[in-house]
Amino acid sequence: MHANYFDGKQGQALAVTVHLEADGIRLEAENQDSTSLTFKTVQLRIGELFQRAPMFVYMNDGSHCEVQDAETKNALQQHLNYQPSVVERWQSHWWLALLAVFILLAALYGAYVKGAPFLAEKMVPLIPDKADVMLGNLAMDALDQTYFKPSRLIDVLSDEVQSVLSRVSPEHPRLPFKLHMRHSKTIGANAFALPSGDVVVTDDMYVLMLNPDRQLDEHGKKLLAAVLAHEIAHVELRHTMRNLAETSLMTVVVNSLIGDFSTVLTTASGTVLNAKYSREKEAEADRYAIALLKEKGVSPIYFALALERLQRSHGVKKTDEDVGWFSEATLDYLSSHPNIQERIQSARAAAKDFKEEPGLK
């Protein structure tokens, strides 16, 4: 009987003849070499068998044999008293294999929905803020190279937006917020904040907040404050880093099953530029934004009005499910939001018992 022997030290195979003996097997080299190796039965283990695949016989010294011939496979199985494992026996029944696949998918779904977010929430506080800064800087550079052009607005108008951002920012922010005005034909009227605290406002967003006289009056400032408060919330709550942690955890779990960890290396950059916040995170950001607006003396009604204005700007129907500062038709990679009508209703409800103070504090 013939086999290929690998000594575990080099990749080259040695063609051998397999001799069955009472207490094991003996391997003899088929070339001019006088190599002869003897292994006791207790030193041998047959790997899991697959149809049409080679049989692997593992030795306790780290070497192994590969057997292709069907007759040799059968002879070795009988001689070494091979007993298939429970998993192998299950695999021979299609319905058990299908059940196993279903259980695995259910477990992965449970890990994705509950397990990963729970672990990520525990992990993120242990990650230093400089990691957020690094990711934000990388994302800002990538966006400037692809989607954005320098702002076409004069500096005075940029200063107006900076003033609103400064006044609506938390008293003690986790990271300092920095304004970036940008022009883009792709994303239209939008604003967003990167994990580093870099806040991007497009020219079209600024124009959308203006009154009929093309001025950013107090009403427009409050609308803009509502938009910025929501994006500030994502930074303060570290939603992007939590997304990254969740994605990384799931990548490790899935790739540990398929044996490929190469995609783990690209997780970070992909998460920042492809961040789709869950409905739970978006609702959490909305609650934070509404509380922040109240703290600054701005009625949550402006949050609802800002959503409605952006909704009209992007031509979104009231029945659309996933709408936020970013239109799915134009920029699908930065945000995914709960039902916009539910968000508007929640903001209006929060405004009912709030007595607005004049201006921003």
Image: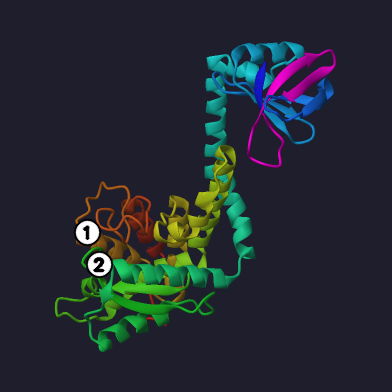
Res. 18 mark: none
Task: Give the residue at mark 1.
Answer: 314
- The spot of residue 161 in percent (x, y) is 32, 80
- The spot of residue 179 in percent (x, y) is 37, 79
Instruction: Identify the image quadrant of residue 123.
Output: bottom right
Instruction: Determine whether 27 is above or below 296 in the image.
Output: above
- Give the residue at x 76% y 29%: 35
Asked if residue 250 can be seen in this view, the reply is yes
Out of 353 and 127, give the one closest to the viewer: 127
Out of 43 and 14, give the one closest to the viewer: 14
Distance between the alpha carbons at the discs numbered 2 and 1: 8 Å
Task: Give the residue at mark 2.
Answer: 189
Q: Say which quadrant the N terminus sits in.
A: top right
Asked if residue 267 can be seen in this view, the reply is no
- Asked whether the residues under the numbered discs 2 and 1 touch, taking CB atoms below 8 Å apart as contact, a structural biologist would say yes
Q: Earlier in the sequence, mark 2 or mark 1?
A: 2
- Give the residue at x 72% y 29%: 58
Residue that extends furthest to the front in the rendered view of this protein: 32
- The spot of residue 70 in percent (x, y) is 60, 13
Instruction: Identify the image quadrant of residue 347.
Output: bottom left
- The spot of residue 351 in percent (x, y) is 38, 64
- For disc 2, the neighbor class at 10 Å (few under 14, some 14 to 19, many from 20) is many
Out of 289 and 54, give the one closest to the viewer: 54
Amino acid type at circle 1 is His
Q: Main secondary structure of the magenta part?
A: strand
- For disc 1, the neighbor class at 10 Å (few under 14, some 14 to 19, many from 20) is many
Residues in magenta?
A: 5-28
